[in-house]
């Protein structure tokens, strides 16, 4: 039966003496244990070892709470024997199949990319046990993603570290402060640097055990660490969480797993109680595993007594009901998303979260993300925003603002941290338009054969009576007749090389809606010619150009 010590630990309120006695008992009953390079003058449970990461570094997990349960006092196997044990034995030594596979895959990957680090998968298992109870007992889907996000407490400085939001709530659903995320409990800013795609699905998801395990491996191997050296291993663990209590607990599980472990089915691992302020994911769908007698909540108080007397004891978390379980996120009736360049979209994206009964589900974190070749943005210039559904299960994205780039792009809405299909929305930005265009003056435009026109052509475009800025205009010298085409003689423009051209397409009105054309030249053929200007939107004006010899 496992020796249970200190069910929960809050930073700054550790039970150093109890944990030290527990580690001593563990070492005495299991033979030689791990030697801590930081052992020696220990003045407190939260002082890092010499040479560890500086204490002002927030660490991978943000120094958030961790589980302090120690391994059983009976080793799962004798030292020196195989670690590939059959699926039997102590529940505490069993690691869920996908979780164990992720740790071993990460070890193989690091062996190929950083062999000098000598990362043992048992170290990842020890950290995974302390950080999340092996992904809450292996509650992961076939791809290794937790059924619901594993979130640590809000790091708002009230009992925990103070870390202001670094990801706009994309990973942790909190746009004010950060929270540790996933089975390896990375804070978002650390994940942004160290995140990995461990299962090859093209994503870096901190809630996926394969991604998280590989990221943890890279983080532990940072610099020139050799984890076969005790001092380097200690520094690596302390960089994850600045606490000697944490180091001792991880070291105990590391030694325990090195002596032997076995695989258990996903979802059937030992499920630790929720940490203060954390979020428990929903159970593996279709299962309702009952913890073995030795893993039922400890009847002894695990929290300090409440003011005024009395104490609280941990209670098992109730299993979510169908009405509390997220089943899908769907389009909630969003209309056609079309806007003119520079304008706001009149329609706003709206989604609905449904439970397994088909009813609305409130307080579901939804992330809206703009993707594609576009300069469209949400209000405030953001490309991604995270919001929570209301009592009716719906949430509406902020106003979408079109940029100057025309064409289609996509906005995806996804339940934050969930392995559910995204809801895609196609949006279209059309070019600015004008419904009228006219000359700004009425001067006659004349030139002698072979000369240039003295006056330039200036026009102004409007749309519904208002100035139409940034509107595309095409200028073409055309022939007479019922079906005009581009003329091959008469007045012309010049290109950058000085060559005659009779059609210009890269023209746009200015901020005041006006456009002044380049100089126009006459060839040697006298006559009256026509210049047609056409705007995006269909507005047209035809201007006469006269080429005539001067009077004798």
Image (cartoon, rainbow, N blue to C red):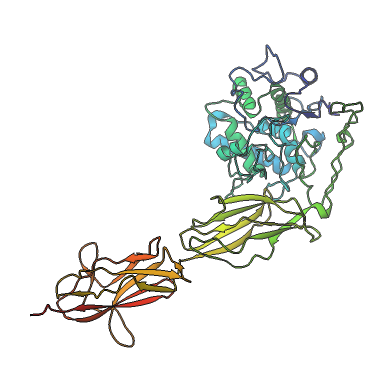
Closer-to-camera residue (345/150)? 345
Q: Residue at the location (79% across, 60% down)?
A: 359
Q: Residue at x 68, y 47 (%)?
A: 145
Quarter where residue 210 is shown: top right
Q: In this orientation, which residue lies closer to the viewer: 405 or 145?
A: 405
At which x and y percent is residue 488?
23, 78
Residue at x 32% of width, y 72% of height: 475
Residue 85, position as x, y percentages in the image: 75, 35
The quadrant of the image that shows the N terminus is top right
Q: Position of residue 351 (x, y in %)?
A: 68, 59
Taking 463 as reference, is 154 above or below it?
A: above
Does residue 253 appear in this view? Answer: yes
* Residue 542 versus residue 391 in the image, above or below: below
Q: Answer with the quarter of the image where residue 391 lies.
A: bottom right
> Is residue 530 shown above or below 72?
below
In the orientation shown, which residue stands out farthest toward the left? 552
Percent x, y of residue 348: 62, 61
- Residue 453 figure quarter: bottom left
Foreground pick, 207 / 401: 401
Query: Of residues 510 and 1, which is closer to you in this image?
Result: 510
- Quadrant containing the C terminus is bottom left
Instruction: Tell me how many marks there are.
Output: 0
Q: Residue furthest front?
A: 442
Determine the residue positioned at 70% across, 44% down: 98
Asked if residue 28 shows in the view, the reply is no
Side (left or right) of 526 relative to 510: left
The residue at the far top in this view is: 41
Look at the picture and state if 277 lies above or below 524: above
Residue that protrudes farthest toward the bottom in the picture: 482
Relative to 5, 129 lies left or right: left
């Amino acid at each position: 039966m496992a020796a249970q010590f200190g069910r929960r630990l809050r930073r700054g309120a550790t039970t150093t003496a109890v944990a030290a006695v527990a580690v001593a008992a563990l070492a005495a009953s299991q033979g030689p244990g791990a030697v801590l390079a930081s052992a020696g003058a220990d003045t407190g449970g939260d002082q890092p070892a010499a040479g560890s990461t500086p204490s002002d570094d927030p660490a991978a997990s943000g120094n958030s709470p961790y589980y302090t349960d120690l391994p059983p006092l009976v080793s799962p196997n004798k030292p020196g024997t195989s670690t590939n044990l059959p699926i039997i034995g102590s529940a505490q030594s069993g690691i869920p199949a996908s979780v164990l596979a992720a740790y071993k895959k990460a070890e193989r990957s690091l062996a190929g990319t950083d062999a000098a680090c000598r990362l043992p998968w048992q170290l990842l298992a020890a950290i995974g046990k302390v950080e999340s109870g092996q992904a809450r007992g292996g509650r992961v889907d076939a791809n290794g993603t937790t059924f619901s996000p594993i979130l640590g407490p809000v790091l708002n400085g009230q009992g925990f570290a103070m870390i202001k939001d670094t990801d706009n709530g994309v990973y942790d659903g909190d746009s004010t402060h950060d929270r540790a995320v996933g089975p390896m409990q990375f804070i978002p800013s650390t994940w942004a640097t160290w995140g990995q795609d461990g299962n090859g699905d093209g994503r870096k998801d901190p809630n996926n055990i394969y991604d998280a395990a590989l990221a943890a491996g890279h983080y532990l191997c940072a610099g020139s660490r050799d984890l076969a050296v005790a001092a380097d291993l200690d520094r690596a663990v302390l960089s994850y969480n600045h606490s000697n209590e944490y180091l001792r607990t991880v070291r105990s599980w590391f030694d325990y797993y090195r002596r032997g472990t076995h695989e258990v089915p996903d979802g059937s691992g030992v499920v630790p109680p929720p940490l203060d302020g954390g979020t428990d994911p929903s159970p593996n769908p279709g299962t309702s595993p009952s913890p073995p007698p030795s893993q039922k909540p400890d009847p002894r108080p695990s929290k300090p007594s409440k003011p005024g007397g009395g104490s609280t004891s941990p209670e098992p978390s109730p299993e979510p009901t169908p009405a509390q379980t997220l089943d899908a996120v769907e389009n909630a009736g969003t209309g056609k998303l079309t806007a003119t360049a520079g304008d706001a979209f009149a329609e706003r994206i709206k989604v609905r979260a449904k439970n397994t009964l088909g009813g609305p589900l409130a307080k579901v974190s939804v992330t809206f993300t703009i993707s594609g070749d576009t300069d469209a943005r949400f209000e405030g210039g953001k490309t991604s925003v995270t919001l929570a559904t209301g009592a009716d299960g719906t949430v509406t994205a902020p106003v979408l603002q079109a940029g100057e780039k025309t064409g289609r792009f996509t906005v995806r809405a996804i339940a934050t941290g969930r392995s559910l299909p995204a809801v895609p929305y196609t949006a279209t930005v059309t070019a600015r338009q004008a419904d009228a265009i006219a000359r700004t003056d009425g001067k006659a435009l004349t030139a002698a054969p072979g000369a240039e026109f003295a006056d330039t052509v200036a026009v102004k475009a409007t749309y519904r009576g208002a100035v139409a800025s940034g509107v595309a205009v095409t200028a073409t010298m055309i022939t007479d007749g019922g079906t005009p085409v581009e003329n091959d003689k008469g007045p012309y423009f010049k290109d950058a090389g000085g060559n005659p051209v009779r059609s210009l397409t890269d023209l746009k009105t200015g901020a005041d809606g006006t456009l002044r054309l380049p100089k126009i030249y006459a060839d040697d053929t006298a006559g009256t010619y026509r210049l047609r200007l056409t705007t995006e939107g269909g507005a047209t004006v035809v201007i006469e150009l006269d080429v005539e010899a001067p009077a004798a």
